[in-house]
Image (spheres, rainbow, N blue to C red):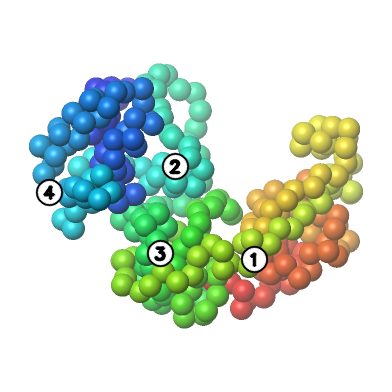
Amino acid sequence: MRCVESPQTKRLRLIDFYLCFFGKVNRSDLIQHGDIAVATASRSFNAYKERFPNNTVFNESLRAYMRSASFSPAFEHDPEAALRLIAWGQELNSIPVTTYGVSSFATVLDSLSIDIVSQVTRSILNKHCISVLYSSSTSTETRTLTPHSLFKGLGAWHIRAWDSKRRKFLCFRVSRILKAQQTDSSYDKTIKDDTLWNRDVVLSVAPHSKHENRNDLAIDLGMEGQYVRNITTNEALAGYVLNDLHVDCTPNASLPPHAFNLQLMNRHELEHVDSIRALVPGFIQNKDDKA
């Protein structure tokens, strides 16, 4: 069983966490993570500055402590926790009790670097471009990206970003970013410019028509009393959603029903969606659509 941290140490760790992944931190950030007074938050910042004087610079206009150029994390941090907080506003907390679960296999398959995740999250939050060395299925090359969002799909964390070289928005797996650094390039593409991200599509799914126990499938899938469920997402994410749900998207429902419990019912309405064609079994893969 691990040693329990004191409340003050937890607050120092939180300050360090914000500086690492957000690039800045103020008193309200500490207050929203716990029931503490303004004076307690101020004491925590004073303690952090005293212990790690080279990690912060105070910005008078923002009334916030900024990450210094010489910043070095004073604590160990979980990059998964940073991504979940920034993507969904979820805070990961653990309690030192006897546990009976197993670790998620996704964390084994998706290796995340604190330095890379820190560059990615700060670029999204502070709206600056990053130059990355990215390893795709076809090549490893340097790209200049303007990321606007985070999401998890196919068991891994991804960013949605404008690729300056290809002149379009694409999805990039975070663990395939081998190097990353901030650039001086202007942040001229935003989420509002991402047409596919802002265009909704409806995915109509049902228990697989060739499964011998469709009623049981409906119960397992929380669809008791109904045989079709409509899922709304955007065009950029549609392929990830269908893949993660193991939906058979073939024209004749030809995939094994025990492996693909769901079947896509409105395939004819979605044949124009690039992310489905690129990622989902049953659609022809278009290599030009891959990041």
Q: Decide: few, some or many residues near mark 4? Use Cα within 10 Å; few <14, some 14-19, many ≥20.
A: some
Q: Indicate the position of residue 271 as horizontal and vertical percent values.
A: 79, 68
Compare residues 166 and 187 and report the one nearer the observer. 187
Location of mark 4 (residue): 54
Q: Decide: few, some or many residues near mark 1? Use Cα within 10 Å; few <14, some 14-19, many ≥20.
A: some
- Sequence-first disc among 4 and 3: 4
Q: Is residue 173 visible?
A: no
SS type, badge 4: loop
Q: Across the whole image, how many numbered discs are drawn on residues?
A: 4
Q: Indicate the position of residue 240 as horizontal and vertical percent values.
A: 64, 57
Task: Give the quarter of the image for residue 39.
Answer: top left
SS type, badge 2: helix
Mark toward the viewer: 2 or 3: 2
Mark toward the viewer: 4 or 3: 4
Mark toward the viewer: 1 or 3: 1
Location of mark 1 (residue): 196
What is the CA distance from the residue labelled 2 to the residue labelled 1?
24 Å
SS type, badge 3: strand
Q: Give amino acid for label 4.
A: Asn
Q: Residue at x 18, y 28 (%)?
A: 43
Q: Say whether marks 2 and 1 touch (CB < 8 Å).
A: no
Location of mark 2 (residue): 85
Q: Residue at x 69, y 69 (%)?
A: 274
